[in-house]
Amino acid sequence: MEIPEKILMSVEKPARYIGGEVNAVEKRNAAIRFAFCFPDVYEVGMSHLGLQILYYFINQRADTYCERAFAPWRDMEGVMRRQGIPLFSLETKEPLCNFDFIGFTLQYELCYTNVLNMLDLSGIPIYSRARTNRHPIICAGGPCAYNPEPMADFVDFFFIGEGEAEQGLDAVFDRYAKGNRREFLEKIKDLPGIYVPSCHTGGTVKKVIVRDMDKAFTPDRQIVPVIEAVHDRAMLEVFRGCGRGCRFCQAGFVCRPARERSPDALRNQAETLIARTGYEEISLLSLSTGDYTGFQPLAQVLLDRFAGDNVNLSLPSTRVDAFTLRIMEKIQGARKSGLTFAPEAGTQRLRDVINKGITEEEILNGCGLAFEGGWSHVKLYFMIGLPTETDEDILGIADLAEKILGVYYKRGGKRQPNVSVSVSSFVPKPFTPFQWEAQNSCEEFSRKQQLLKRAIKNKRIKYTYHDSRMSVIEGALARGDRRAGQAVARVWELGARFDSWSEFFSYELWERAFTESGLAIEEYTGGRDISRPLPWAFISTGVSEEFLRSERRLAYEGAVTRNCGESCAGCGADAAFDAGGICRGV
Amino acid sequence: MAFKYRLKFAKLGLVKFVGHLDLLKALERAVMRGRVPVAFSHGFNRHQLITIAQPLPLGMESVGEYADIELARQITPEELAERLNAAMPSGLRALAARQLAPGEKNAAAATAAAEYEIMFEDFSGLQERVNELLAAEQVIVQKKSKRQERQADIRPDIFKIEVLDARRLRALLAAGSSGNLSPRVLAEALARENDWSARYRRLEMFGKRGGGFEAL
Ligand code: SF4
């Protein structure tokens, strides 16, 4: 299909729709065509490591061509609808309805309306049951697929886990034959990690993971976006999963166990990524990069290797010690952008409840070191609405920020210090010890936001908070059941798109959609009966429900659980994956 | 010791929808992939010493773009072009390169004129209209800037127009800091009230030389 130029001339950032990037794959005569869809705008989707991995993983197969599509921005959607232009892939500009598979990655709940919109723009019925043999097979994966129910009416099959695993997506393509969707879905329904809502007869769907990160497929290149992406740099995944066990963190639990890559493999990958992308920056990615066993030598090796080539390193600075600071000093622009801490809660009591293994002393010491090293800007991330939280915990956020300023002045800092406090709203997520908790209401969140606002008096403290109404809808969908999908379909019909963008999000629209579907938001955000099964109970992440219950109990007692690197807490993930022995400590 | 080169390159096809700053990024990354021994600025935010002569409006193609690039060591101009071509994104192509003479002005400062091809979708009586415009002493257009609209005479900025066929023309227009005329403004002025949908291609950019122009 040729995209009329006039259309591209009429929209904002037309380069979102042109493809042709360095390292994009060209392929002819592939039997199977797969459209990898990221249900957000190009610049966001292209920043995503999972897209880059799966794109090249699928394209390794000679018989399969993986192309990309993103959610067209609202101006482009308008033009496409007016002129009857179907959603197309970036590589060949082929309408998506002509593909064999359309695969969505579900990274956050507020992208669900974009999924439906992309299907509709492709001329494909949004409900699975309305599709026929001439329509593509619609699949989905990613973190939100761990609770597939709200999207189960729209998706033909879900893939739970890591697609590039040995038992991953290849098995699906191997069984594919054109023509009969029913037959195909029957054939794949019992494969590891596969959930076919229309054929599911009970039984557990267990996630699929890569056992050995060094042997797993790792791309030696990245598609280099033609317009600046949100994260526009070489991405080096140092490990997957996380052993910290922060009790609010869904990624931490569903991605267990933590699996590291070796420093050699990382160094080699950095070499080829830089050579093939021309990026000027490498970032070390994982859920908590400072925890990587060989963090110091790795950072040092990369700095030494690339400094001469003017390639910068970017480090998430959650653990601040003398070494990290020394490294950071060598990193361009690091002083300007400031240091980042995520205490998440304002008091030690609450940090123990959520098992955030960072103490006030560590934060203050880290800041002290940083201030001595010439830093004057510190960013702090917190959450409000955490289980057991009281107003004292909220006020503790202001106290901590004040104490940090105090440290600055005590160390004789001469410039104007800046402490920014960024506060988000807690969302209870499936497969965490807090999956049964009630979420705060919008009113309660606002009250707490204002309470904190009044408590922060110093002008050197910059306070920002997120729209808690978005978090409430996120919460309702995160713990939604099959019926919640009706609200998603309804709100999309009412015009909701790009709900993760505050300029487009409308709480009123969602409220109306829930009501018109005969549902109440509070029904989903409220506390859950711990003795009743949860809608996502048939999915297994390897972490036992018993462990989650015990973590919940410990949370209420304010007792911390040590991270996997120190000692195994027995979450079950190790035993769940075959012979065991995946976990370092076990 | 600095080694300064001038690169001539083409921007064709869909890449014409990549704007100026993103284009600069794309060139810088091609420089890295192609292992061009580029020189970097010193100081806090180090960056490659590359500058593009003049931004090309979004949506226009070109076979006459220029950029100046400073290298840390000498290589032949041919090697520079080859290294870049091995690494450029689709639609971008190095056409030629030369080493700058000592003391030569940089591309942006030297730019005085640019030649464009304008391809109208439809235009009745193009030749007559061009004759009329060239014969006029003044050609007044509304120039819109961010805040205000003002009238401007663009006649002095039109150096030459050559009609190629019923719908196509070639125009040499002022470019650079001491006067700049966008071919879109010319197209609109030619078409008056009529539809002026057209495609544009920059063909060449010039500096002043004696009484005339010389390609950068
Ligand atoms: S089995 Fe033990 S070491 Fe492995 S992820 Fe669970 S708690 Fe951590």
Image (tube, helix red, strand yellow):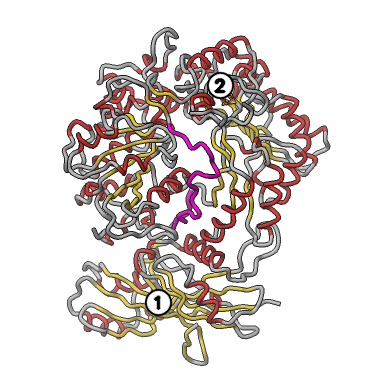
* Residues tagged by mark 2 and mark 1 found on one chain of the structure: no
Pointers 2 and 1 in contact (C-beta within 8 Å): no
Disc 1 secondary structure class: strand
Q: Position of residue A444 (x, y in %)?
A: 49, 16
Residue A560 falls in image quadrant: top right
Residue A94 in picture, x, y percent from top left: 26, 54
Label 2 Cα neighbours within 10 Å, binned few <14 / some 14-19 / many ≥20: many
The answer to whether residue A413 is seen in the rendering is yes
- Residue type for callout 1: Val
Write down the quadrant of residue A461 in the picture. Answer: top right
* Residue placed most toward the observer, B210 or A499: A499
Quadrant containing the C terminus of chain A is top right
Mark 2 sits on what residue? A247
Q: How many angstroms separate mark 2 from mark 1 (CA)?
A: 58 Å
The stretch in magenta equals A208-229
Horizontal arrangement in the rendering, residue B197 relative to residue A309 (left or right): left
Q: Is residue B42 above or below residue A498?
A: below
The quadrant where ligand 1 appears is top right
Q: Report the residue marked by disc 1.
A: B63
Chain label for disc 2: A
| Residue depicted at 45% across the width and 55% down the height | A223
Secondary element type, mark 2: loop
